[in-house]
């Protein structure tokens, strides 16, 4: 008994040292294999003890200990053994987890992919959590290659950012009829877009209407509109505000193209008085101005889903001749659209034609009379009878509940026509007119207009425009950036068109 009693402490100490050496060979130094400084704190008191036994139960209950295998045995982990704080399963799974703590399962790839080094991990050394959770996707069952090719969080966040918001319009075509590339930075690689262009004579209100349809309201100051309208000084000297083609895209991915006035006398006057040099293919200034207008109109007929024709009185026959000429000179564009809405001809499938909306701006009260409205629709239908442009069947004022007493079949030949009244101050003028009478009670009633308010009409027009069909512009589906490059090629082709050159030669 005494022999065994004297040899027992020595044997126990020798067996303990052997176990420690074996543990050192298997797992290395304590600072390398035991995860975290908490394990070091638990291990050091046991080194200072004598040969007496100390049960490890109370120490394990205080802080859970996670052991890590050496790098040589980490290639074939078991299903229940954690590696670097993240379990590796045989079956590959996709895991999305917020980075809450670096030592818990579901650790981001930055912490899970790092092998166990001689010291604690980076997050444990810092002793703090990240300020914001970072979400990542990792294939846990594909090994180290999947961890190294994890998705960059900055790339994923950049794809979720909203597109850059424009505050004002920029040039797509400058006053020298040259293409500008500054609009490409606002476009994205997505196909759900609508392109709306506008043409009209000088002073008809094109820029104001495009601003109201895109980003502004009638209550705002016109000096802050995205498309600059004519100032009072420009109106008094008979000048024009817009030159070339202006570009603006909304957050709803609607592209608006505002243009200089068609057949503008102020542009012709500027050419003559400033002795500007004409291109060599043009001999007379008025020929150059007309060809500029035809180039812009033919360009819009090719790259737009909707083209708004603005008039401030009904109606100018020269404007309809101009539309038919621009349609004749439009470059041929193959279209994969099978939409045959409107009075399209048999060869509508071979070429693309946009939807045309005739907007009567500054309409009077008599224009809203149902009889006059019917006459205007019949006149436009007869003038555009031989056109391939889609001028009917896609916009209706009767659907807007503007004329509640009229049935849907009142207009036998309803074209894409919309009426906008004069923009005026609806409050003070009506109170002044009504209060000037002998009945002061009438001052509390709104004045009779014969139509809804201007802001209401603009809202109804905007809803109708945004609901227009988005036909395919070319033989392939275009993204926003592809549309920009496609439009640049169309503009270059329009400027070099042999048909337009021959037509300008005949005008001389």
Image: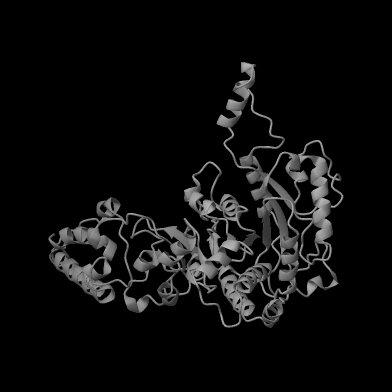
Looking at the image, can residue 59 be seen?
A: yes
Q: Quadrant of the N terminus?
A: bottom left
Left or right for 292, reference 330: left
**Foreground residue among 376 and 180:** 376
Q: How many marks?
A: 0
Looking at the image, can residue 39 be seen?
A: no
- Residue drawn at x 70%, y 41% is 364
**Foreground residue among 269 and 174:** 269
Q: Position of residue 104 (x, y in %)?
A: 37, 58
Residue 352 lies in quadrant:
bottom right
Establish if 298 lies above or below 368: below
**Foreground residue among 40 and 292:** 292
Residue 79 lies in quadrant:
bottom left
Q: Position of residue 59 (x, y in %)?
A: 25, 54
Q: Position of residue 36 (x, y in %)?
A: 26, 62
**Foreground residue among 232 and 123:** 232
Left or right for 421, reference 7: right
- Residue drawn at x 52%, y 72% is 176
Q: Quadrant of the C terminus?
A: bottom right
Toward the front, the furthest residue is 273
- Residue drawn at x 64%, y 70% is 290
Establish if 422 lies above or below 381: above
Establish if 364 lies above or below 330: above
Q: Position of residue 82 (x, y in %)?
A: 39, 65
């Amino acid at each position: 008994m005494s022999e065994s009693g004297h040899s027992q402490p020595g044997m126990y100490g020798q067996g303990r040292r052997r176990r420690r050496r074996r543990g050192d060979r298997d797992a290395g130094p304590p600072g390398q294999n035991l995860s975290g400084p908490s394990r070091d704190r638990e291990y050091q008191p046991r080194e200072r003890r004598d040969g007496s036994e100390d049960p490890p139960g109370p120490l394990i209950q205080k802080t859970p200990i996670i052991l890590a295998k050496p790098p040589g045995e980490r290639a074939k982990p078991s299903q229940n053994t954690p590696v670097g704080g993240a379990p590796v399963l045989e079956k590959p799974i996709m895991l999305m987890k917020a980075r809450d703590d670096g030592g818990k399962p579901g650790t981001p790839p930055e912490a899970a992919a790092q092998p166990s080094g001689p010291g604690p991990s980076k997050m444990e050394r810092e002793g703090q959590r990240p300020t914001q959770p970072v979400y990542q996707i990792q294939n846990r069952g594909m090994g180290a290659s999947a961890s190294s090719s994890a998705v960059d969080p900055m790339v994923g966040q950049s794809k979720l950012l909203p597109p850059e918001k424009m505050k004002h319009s920029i040039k797509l075509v400058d006053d020298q009829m040259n293409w500008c590339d500054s609009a490409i930075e606002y476009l994205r690689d997505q196909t759900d877009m609508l392109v709306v262009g506008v043409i009209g004579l000088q002073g008809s209100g094109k820029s104001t209407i495009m601003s109201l349809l895109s980003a502004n309201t009638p209550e705002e100051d016109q000096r802050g509109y995205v498309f600059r309208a004519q100032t009072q000084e420009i109106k008094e000297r008979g000048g024009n505000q817009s030159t070339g083609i202006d570009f603006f895209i909304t957050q709803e991915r609607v592209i608006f193209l505002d243009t200089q006035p068609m057949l503008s006398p102020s542009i012709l006057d500027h050419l003559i008085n400033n002795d500007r040099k004409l291109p060599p293919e043009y001999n007379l200034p008025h020929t150059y101005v007309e060809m500029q207008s035809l180039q812009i109109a033919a360009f819009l007929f090719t790259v737009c889903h909707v083209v708004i024709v603005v008039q401030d009185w009904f109606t100018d026959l020269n404007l309809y001749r101009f539309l038919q000429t621009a349609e004749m000179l439009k470059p041929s564009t193959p279209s994969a659209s099978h939409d045959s809405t409107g009075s399209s001809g048999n060869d509508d499938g071979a070429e693309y034609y946009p939807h045309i909306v005739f907007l009567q701006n500054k309409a009077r009260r008599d224009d809203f009379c149902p009889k006059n409205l019917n006459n205007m629709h019949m006149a436009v239908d007869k003038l555009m009878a031989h056109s391939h442009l889609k001028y009917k069947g896609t916009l209706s004022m009767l659907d807007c509940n503007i004329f509640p007493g009229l049935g849907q079949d009142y207009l036998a030949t309803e074209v894409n026509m919309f009426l906008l009244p004069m923009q005026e101050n609806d409050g003070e003028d009506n109170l002044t007119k009504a209060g000037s009478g002998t009945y002061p009670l009438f001052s509390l009633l709104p004045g009779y207009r014969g139509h809804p308010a201007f802001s209401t009409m603009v809202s109804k027009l905007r809803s109708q425009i945004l609901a227009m069909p988005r036909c395919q512009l070319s033989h392939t589906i275009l993204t926003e950036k592809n549309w920009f490059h496609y439009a640049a090629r169309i503009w270059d082709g329009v400027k070099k068109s042999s048909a337009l050159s021959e037509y300008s030669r005949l005008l001389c």
